[in-house]
Image: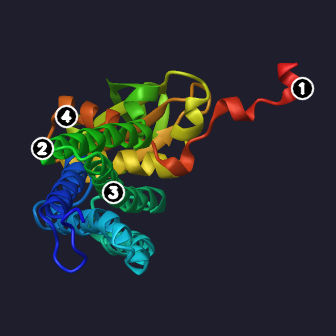
Amino acid sequence: MDGRGPMVISTEDLWLIIIAIAMGTMARLLVLKVDYKQYPSYPNGVLIHVVLAFVAASIGAVAIPAIKSNNYTAVTFLALAVQNFRDVRKTERESLKDLEETEYTPRGNAYIDGIAKTFEARNYFALVVSLTTAASMEIVAALHIGIMYQVVAGILAGCIVYQVISRFSKGKSVGDVAAVRLADIKVEGCEVSVEGTFVTNLAGTQNAQKMIAKEGVAVIIEPNQKHSAIALHNFGQRKAILFEATRTLGAKRYNFTRKDYETGKIIILFVPIVRDFEKLIDVVKNTPLLESVKKSHAVLRSKAVEE
């Protein structure tokens, strides 16, 4: 007997569960900070996801002791967790769609789907890190090594898995595939253009013309490579960029997004509440590239062309 009775939890098992839960929850917290500019809202939205992370980490932490005690039925909670996380994605999608009419500009279905999938996936962060931490501690315990070595082994394993998963799941942003710069707005009568590219003819009144000319801001997004324009020209991607820009600076009135078919440039124009050009450039660069619009140019090459 190793002192780990089936009816009373041992000290080693207790340490295993505590460390595994802590590591899984911490893994979720580390990636949660990336989402402040998008979602969830702070602090209530953050609290919801922290609690979900704790639940996910708890499931991963108790799976190893359950298997060790031959309680294989308890492992079915892993399958139940997966289903619950899928429900989280559905709930997030429905919640964001309900908020569309209250925003300065809509996120768009593509952006909403990306956010919902991201939050489902990041709950698996907590589950996998917690499970790996618990498994590592149990392996070291089988070697009859002290509890401190078990804790250190579990923390190291959890950190390594977190780094691997976070690098694998990290997506690109607009700034990774395009150059972003401010552009001059030109108003001629009711027509508005940006560096020679027509944007709109809705500036029909003098007040509108003065507002756009005096207070409007415009940004040009130029793809670094030709195939990058495939993603940037997607309507869902352009709506996501416009949404982040208007949500950060506000939108007093008018907001447009246009694409130049000849040069591949994307134009974002709106009248902000706060005129902060540096922040505008940063938020456009940090807008994520949506998974639904990403294409691999290497896959699109035909064998005939390569030969």
- Mark 4 residue crowding within 10 angstroms, few (<14) / some (14–19) / many (20+): some
In space, the residues marked 1 and 4 are separated at their CA atoms by 46 Å
Instruction: Kindly identify which residue carries mark 1.
Output: 304
Label 4 vs label 3, nearer the camera: 3
Q: How many marks?
A: 4
Amino acid residing under circle 3: Leu
Helix, strand or loop at mark 4: helix
Which of marks 1 and 3 precedes in the sequence?
Answer: 3
The part of the image, by quadrant, that contains residue 64 is bottom left
**Picture coordinates of residue 124 (x, y %)?**
37, 58
Q: Which mark is residue 279?
A: 4
Per the model, the C-alpha gap separating discs 4 and 2 is 47 Å
Q: Residues within 10 Å of mark 2 (few under 14, many from 20)?
A: few
Q: Position of residue 115 (x, y in %)?
A: 38, 57
Residue that badge 3 annotates: 131
Q: Tell which of 299 and 200 is nearer to you.
A: 299
Residue 271 can be seen, yes or no: no
Residue 13 seen in the current view: yes
Please report the residue visible at 44 percent of the width from the left and 39 percent of the height from the top. Answer: 168
Front residue of this view, candidates 235 and 63? 63
Kind of residue at disc 4: Lys
Give how far apart the Cα atoms at labels 2 and 3 are: 19 Å
Which of label 2 and label 3 is nearer to you?
A: 2
Helix, strand or loop for disc 3: helix
Mark 2 or 3 closer to N-term? 3
Mark 4 or mark 3: name the one nearer the start of the chain.
3
CA gap, disc 2 to disc 1? 60 Å
Residue beneath the point at 56% across and 22% down: 225
